[in-house]
Image (cartoon, rainbow, N blue to C red):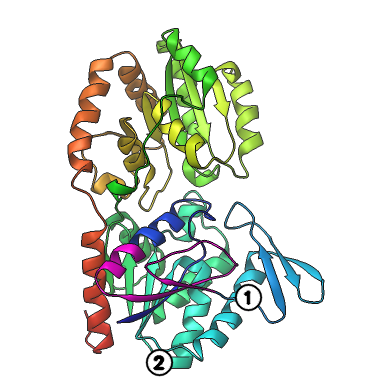
């Protein structure tokens, strides 16, 4: 079974959970015999021993310098030394044509494309080759727009791809319902395959946490509440800050750690000041490696306040690094993680009450984490890979599922 996988990012050159999900899913698929060629829109020197990674560069382009966030501009360096900056739509156009040229010399059974960023290329390939197209939806435009209509160009790309796709994979029932509501796709065309986590890939922590200031504050009996995400409207961080203000009244010795990069960075700083809690809020910017792991580990509670989160790997990562979680009910991970606190993203009072309950009651935090770890230990990408292999085989044989 040869799979042509179209994806926008892979670790360590990823801006969020999409790249992580693609990596882990491909690794699990390869263990089941899938022969995967993964096509990226940029060059990388990283080695992925379980699959072939190909770089789809536009004609005469020698290098692509990727920014930290998936939706930023990329710098294209041509062989003659010329430099060009392309926005996200220009990148898609170049990727689409480059993938079509690469695919013309490749043999594959199925096209598997992740999110709207790669859907145009997948549509072109399906028309060019007649191979079945699996559209894997990790989010839709309404998610990324924080519940609003969003970009009409992106919505058109999603709509056309979902209409034409032979099969749609949604990462949660939450996402499936949104696809049906926004694009009127028949429910029987959509399979739900939840994301997961590979517990073996959780790197060990060392004895010295990178957040020295917070470590010192904890030694003085302060608590730390953390969130890790892109700083965008989708993630509900303004509500998190408003809840933090209320928590500061109920549990004054509480710090709030916000890890991530994005367009709301300066807005969040200003809001923290306006709410009178700037002295209790730490914004770190985008982090990787030890700093990323230690952000989970330093926290007494992890909060995912997303307005709409198709799945949301971060609460599972938090449990892996020893921290209980409070998550938005408007998330896919709420369907698979039972032993955590849950709140509607808009319920600021409820969010604040649950945060305060945990930081004021260590026994509650311990019980939440203990129960969550039992759930966590049973998670793997194996079930997702098994379900996908079944979809691949049926569509290769021309059988509707």
**Residue 197 vs residue 93: left or right?**
left
Can residue 369 be seen here?
yes
The quarter holding residue 297 reads top left
Q: Residue at x 21, y 61 (%)?
A: 383
**Residue 388 vs residue 184: left or right?**
left
Does the magenta run of residues contain 27?
A: yes
Q: Position of residue 30 (x, y in %)?
A: 31, 69
Q: Which residues are magenta?
A: 26-54
Please give the label number shown on residue 130.
2
Q: Nearer the viewer, mark 2 or mark 1?
A: 1
Q: Secondary structure at mark 1?
A: loop
Check contact, mark 2 vs mark 1: CB within 8 A. no
Q: Position of residue 350 (x, y in %)?
A: 35, 26
In this rendered view, identify the residue nearer to me: 30 or 169.
30
Mark 2 or mark 1, which has the lower sequence index? 1
Q: Position of residue 37 (x, y in %)?
A: 43, 76
Please give the label number shown on residue 57.
1
> Label 2, label 1: how many angstroms apart (C-alpha)?
23 Å
Q: Secondary structure at mark 2?
A: loop
Does the magenta run of residues contain 45?
A: yes
């Amino acid at each position: 079974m040869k799979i042509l996988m179209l994806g926008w990012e892979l670790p360590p050159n990823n801006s969020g959970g999409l790249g992580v999900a693609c990596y882990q899913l491909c690794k699990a698929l390869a263990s089941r015999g899938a022969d995967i060629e993964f096509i990226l829109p940029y060059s990388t020197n990283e080695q992925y021993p379980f699959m072939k990674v190909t770089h789809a560069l536009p004609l005469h382009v020698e290098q692509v310098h990727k920014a930290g966030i998936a939706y930023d501009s990329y710098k294209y360096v041509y062989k003659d030394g010329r430099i060009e900056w392309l926005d996200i739509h220009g990148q898609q156009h170049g990727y689409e044509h480059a993938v079509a040229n690469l695919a013309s010399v490749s043999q594959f059974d199925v096209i598997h494309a992740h999110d709207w960023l790669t859907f145009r290329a997948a549509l072109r390939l399906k028309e060019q080759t007649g191979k079945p197209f699996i559209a894997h939806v990790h989010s839709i435009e309404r998610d990324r727009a924080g519940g609003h209509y969003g970009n009409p160009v992106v919505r058109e790309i999603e709509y056309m791809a979902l209409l034409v796709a032979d099969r749609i994979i949604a990462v949660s029932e939450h996402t499936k319902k949104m696809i049906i509501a926004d694009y009127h796709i028949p429910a029987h065309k959509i399979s739900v395959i939840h994301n997961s986590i590979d517990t073996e890939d959780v790197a060990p922590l060392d004895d010295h946490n990178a957040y020295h200031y917070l470590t010192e504050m904890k030694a003085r009996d302060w608590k730390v509440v953390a969130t890790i995400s892109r700083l965008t409207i989708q993630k509900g961080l303004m509500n998190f800050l408003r809840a933090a203000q209320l928590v500061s009244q109920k549990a004054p010795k509480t710090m709030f750690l916000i890890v991530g990069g994005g367009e709301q960075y300066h807005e969040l700083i200003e809001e923290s000041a306006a709410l009178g809690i700037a002295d209790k809020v730490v914004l770190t910017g985008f982090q990787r490696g030890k700093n990323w792991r230690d952000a989970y580990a330093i926290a007494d509670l992890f909060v995912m306040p997303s307005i709409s989160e198709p799945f949301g790997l971060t609460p599972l990562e938090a449990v892996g690094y020893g921290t209980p979680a409070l998550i938005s009910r408007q998330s896919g991970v709420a369907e698979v993680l039972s032993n955590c606190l849950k709140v509607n993203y808009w319920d600021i009072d409820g969010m604040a009450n649950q945060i305060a309950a945990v930081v004021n009651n260590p026994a509650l935090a311990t019980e939440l984490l203990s129960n969550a770890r039992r759930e966590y230990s049973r998670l793997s990408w194996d079930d997702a890979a098994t379900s996908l292999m079944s979809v691949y085989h049926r569509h290769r044989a021309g059988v509707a599922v």
